[in-house]
Image (tube, rainbow, N blue to C red):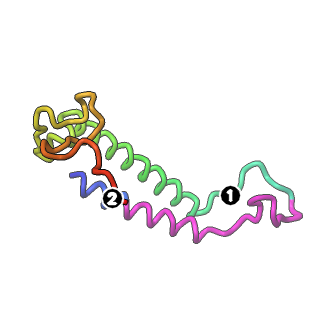
Amino acid sequence: MENVILTIQLILALMLIGVVLLQRSEGGGLGMGGSNSLMSGRSAATALAKLTWIFAICFIATSITLTVLAARKAGSESVIDQLGISAAPGNTLLDGDLLPPQPADAPIAPPPADK
């Protein structure tokens, strides 16, 4: 189910990018360009602009759906539980000891250097 929605979202993202790139530039971005005609309060909605809105709404809907599905799955168990790893007692960093475990026969101090 998630893979189908994720595939649909990927296709929607690519189509949204394509439709946005196909639209005519208005020339007003970042204050560059412009025209001498009067600016109307509402521009005519072209077919590409309507298609952009449809793709954007569908993209947001699939994003919300994927978020809800992921939240449901994440609430049931942790990542460690999914991997099937069990922690050995006394071998975790949660015991308060942040140093790695030392072997029993390891020297506590390094041997002195010969000069």
Viewer-nearest residue: 27 or 95: 95
Quick one: label 1, few (<14), some, or many (20+) residues within 10 Å? few
Q: Is residue 59 left or right of residue 27?
A: left
Residue appearing at x 28%, y 38% in the figure: 99
Q: Is residue 12 left or right of residue 98?
A: right
Residue at 10% across, 45% down:
84
Assign a secondary structure to mark 2.
loop
Depth check, front residue: 87 or 109: 109
Residue segment shown in magenta: 10-37
Q: Which mark is residue 44?
A: 1
Q: Is residue 20 above or below residue 104?
A: below
The disc label shown at residue 22, or none? none
Residue pictured at 58% horizontal, 71% vertical: 22
Instruction: Name the spot of residue 16 as percent of width and height, x first.
Output: 49, 62
Residue 95, given in percent of the width and then of the height, sits at 23, 28
Look at the image and tell me in which quarter the C terminus lies.
Answer: bottom left
Query: Which amino acid type is marked by label 1?
Result: Ala
Name the spot of residue 83 as percent of width and height, x first: 14, 47
Residue at the limit of the structure toward the front, as seen here:
115
Q: Residue furthest top?
A: 96
Is 70 or 28 nearer to us in this picture? 70
Residue drawn 33% across the image and 58% down it: 114
Q: Identity of the amino acid at label 2? A: Asp
* Residue denoted by label 2: 114
Please tell me whether mark 1 sits on a helix, a strand or a loop.
Answer: loop
- Name the side, left or right, on which 85 lies relative to 9: left
User: For this view, does 9 lie left or right of residue 106?
Assistant: right
> Does 35 lie within the magenta span?
yes
Q: Is residue 27 magenta?
A: yes
Give residue 35's quadrant in the image. Answer: bottom right
State which mark lies toward you, 1 or 2.
Answer: 2
